[in-house]
Image (cartoon, rainbow, N blue to C red):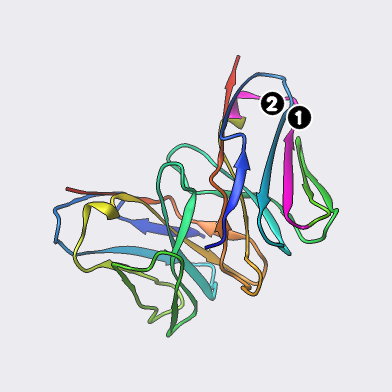
Amino acid sequence: NAGVTQTPKFQVLKTGQSMTLQCAQDMNHEYMSWYRQDPGMGLRLIHYSVGAGITDQGEVPNGYNVSRSTTEDFPLRLLSAAPSQTSVYFCASKGYQETQYFGPGTRLLVL
Amino acid sequence: GQQLNQSPQSMFIQEGEDVSMNCTSSSIFNTWLWYKQDPGEGPVLLIALYKAGELTSNGRLTAQFGITRKDSFLNISASIPSDVGIYFCAGPPPGTASKLTFGTGTRLQVTL
């Protein structure tokens, strides 16, 4: 099993550009989530999904969209990137137990 | 929103020393989780605690679920260089089953 995979690993955007961060898991987990990590602030929940077709907002959802058309994939979309969205983004998935498995992260710089 | 405060924020210790860190919340948690994040990687779960007063070990790591349910503690015995990283506490806030709130982290650096 590959676990949780994220692409790309690094990305540089200009303000106003759009992009999609990809996340996939092969563990058949129903729950998936996106976090952003900023220095000194830990990880903050952006959006999450409890199953295909179901998504909900987390702590910091503004500026981000998500969809969950399959169990395996949970892409995160930035419609109009802003410098405040410069961060490291982690995708995670969880089965029935509490363990959340995190991907390796995407480092995003918005100029 | 919910906030988990960790202390210390960072620490330098010598190899072989024991380490203690803690996490406090303004409200009750029913589950406490401790994660470690290596540089350039995502967090990895170390220990999960489900009951007030519970003491759980994972090798050289021991974590405790505070009696008040508003705090948790992590101890590392006989630290080694690979213990370097950031340690996060986390838990689902009351009324949420799967959403996690993370602490601000304790950065551990080990000197030889």
CA–CA distance in space, label 1 to label 2:
6 Å
Callout 1: few (<14), some (14-19), or many (20+) C-alpha neighbours within 10 Å?
some
Residue A39 locus on image (x, y percent): 41, 42
Residue B86 locus on image (x, y percent): 55, 38
Q: Range of the magenta residues?
A: B69-82
The reply to whether discs 1 and 2 touch (Cβ–Cβ < 8 Å) is yes
Residue A7 locus on image (x, y percent): 32, 57
Q: Nearer the viewer, residue B101 or A94?
A: B101
Q: Is residue B62 above or below residue B77?
A: below
**Residue lying furthest top:** B112
Instruction: Tally the numbered discs.
Output: 2
Q: Nearer the viewer, residue B16 or A59?
A: A59
The amino acid on which the numbered mark 1 sits, given as a three-letter code, is Ser
Q: Is residue B79 in the magenta section? A: yes
User: Is label 1 in a helix, a strand or a loop?
Assistant: loop
Q: Is residue A61 in the magenta section? A: no
* Residues indicated by labels 1 and 2 sit on the same polypeptide chain: yes
Quarter placement of the C terminus of chain B: top right
The residue that label 2 is drawn on is B79
Q: Is residue B22 above or below residue B90?
A: above
Callout 2: few (<14), some (14-19), or many (20+) C-alpha neighbours within 10 Å?
many
Q: Chain of mark 2?
A: B
Q: Chain of mark 1?
A: B
The residue that label 1 is drawn on is B77
Q: Is residue B84 above or below residue A77?
A: above
Q: Nearer the viewer, residue B40 or B65?
A: B65
